[in-house]
Amino acid sequence: MSSQSNLNEVIPLRVKLGHSFTDQKPGTSGLRKSTKQFQENHYLESFIESIFRTLPGVKGGILILGGDGRFGNRKAIDVIIRMAAAHGVRKVITTVDGILSTPAASHLIRINNSIGGIILSASHNSGGKDGDFGVKINGSNGGPASESLTNSIYACSQNLKEYQIIQNQEISLSVPGEYEIFSMKVEVIDGLKDYIDLMQTIFDFDRIGAFLTKDFPIAFDALNAVTGPYAKKILEDILGACKGTVKNGVPLEDFGGCHPDPNLTYAKELADALLLGNKYFFGAACDGDGDRNMILGKGCFVNPSDSLAVLAANADCVPAYSSGLLGIARSMPTSSAVDIVAKDLGVKCYETPTGWKFFGNLLDSGQITLCGEESFGTGSNHVREKDGLWAVLFWLQILADKKCSVHELMHRHWSKYGRHYYSRHDYEEISSEIAKDLYQRVELMLPSLSGKQFGRRVVKLADNFSYKDPIDSSITTNQGLRILLDDGSRVILRLSGTGTRGATLRVYLESYVASDGNLNQDPQSALCELIRDIDYLAEITKRTGMTSPTVIT
Ligand code: G6P
Ligand code: ZN
């Protein structure tokens, strides 16, 4: 063990804060702010101190630490290591170059018996000096911290007067190694290995490899973010996909100026290659920290709700799930496509609020095996986060087994279960005031909507979604405005909990066509009446001045 410090007798510094920071309330997924704000003196330290004062088991515990490589990652790792040492953490496990995807972090937390992890990422938000930075906190089960924990962290930050840190030179993250700082161990490990080992226990790599090397060209876009090294190793080195399969595979501090969100708008190059070009049979992309995924076939975009339904319906192709699924869960705004599959499989389907943390109790208690969200997240009980590359491998395993194209697989699926036409319309960077007024106005209208006309449909039920956790009975309210219509269609309004600039209004649209109906429509035309009717009801164009959404998925 190399010791970069002989400061064992050194006393942690207590650094006084000029003022407490009152805006450190974690959103849907950790504390997410502009990089500039995080650069403000003591801003990061204040939040980390609040974590160390609140997270159970810090003294003597093991902590997992890493991030998606965005600007600020390394500096934050250095600060957190020194603060962890000051707080009596027994060991920090971090990774070479500080590169650690969110699902890989979740796995490391679980296999190292740790108290939890700190993941430095603002997920799919842009990075760099002019982008965003974020700090995500995961608990000992490997999943995002519960709301009660993040509320306590926030409460702590509100009145924080000082933080503790030790002075020590920055340790090198360029190669694996072990260090001792102020009687705390720091292990720098290869951040890829444990995750890749896990994938090999879930999937049949030989079978996927044989399929990929037999004339099935694929493209994976890492969007210059964290999944590049993982994907190169798995897809190119182990499975034998040709060199160059992984695009934008080196994590860059500003993601090369691109927005690391795998959707048709921000992963346009890949989308164009698959939807307009002829070169690839399969395409996929992941987000900044590797938990989201987008799946494409030649000429075919798979919406995430359908993706979850297809994975569930074909789970028997994957060795780890071949003995059946315990149950399935989806977030409320995710389409009901998976509900029909669950019914067919004879397993329960749970509907949770938006946010991966709500799947935690169901996974921990063995109620579900698979879960997913419309926001390009899919996962299983192998970790406690959604997992982008796992979803890609799952798709490849199914295709290797069925020996068909993505397009064919989708059509077979819809011909059996019917099709849930689905789309999400995002109105980004609206002034918070306008968004709040618009939302509150619709919320006030909800009780009177039932039985009223909504275009040519009639409202069956309108409410603000609330959830009672079936395991701990906790109740979460105000999770989105639902308008359920008499023909099974739904429109949902939500305000995003992950944006950092103004407000983002999300409109989720869903309409079901049975297997004997028209399964070949463009989703935007299939949903055009709902799009028109919600605009009329919620006065979106009128109030925001926006004639079309910023992003359509
Ligand atoms: C993060 C969470 C997801 C959640 C999403 C919602 O990515 O990890 O579980 O679905 O945020 O984002 P939104 O912007 O809609 O609140
Ligand atoms: Zn993410």
Image (spheres, rainbow, N blue to C red):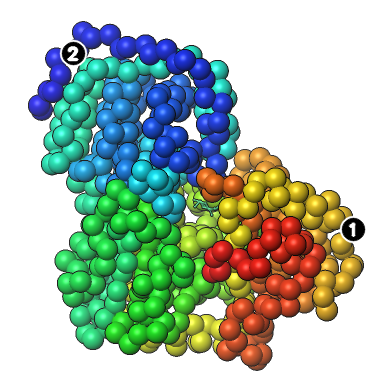
Which residue occupies 32% across, 24% down?
A: 84
Left or right: residue 212 versus residue 24 is left
What amino acid type is highlighted by mark number 1? Ser
Left or right: residue 494 versus residue 217 is right
SS assignment at label 1: helix
Left or right: residue 177 versus residue 390 is left
- Residue 377, position in %: x, y? 47, 60
What amino acid type is highlighted by mark number 2? Leu
Residue highlighted by disc 1: 448
- Residue 26, position in %: x, y? 53, 37
Which residue occupies 69% across, 58% down?
A: 544
| Residue occupying the far front of the picture | 545
- Residue 378, position in %: x, y? 46, 61
For residue 287, what is the image quadrant? bottom left
Q: Is residue 134 visible?
A: no
What numbered label is drawn on residue 15?
Answer: none
Q: Nearer the viewer, residue 145 or 364?
A: 145
Q: CA distance from mark 2 to mark 1?
A: 68 Å
Q: Nearer the viewer, residue 12 or 362?
A: 12
Question: Quick check: 540 above or below 418?
Answer: above
Residue highlighted by disc 2: 7
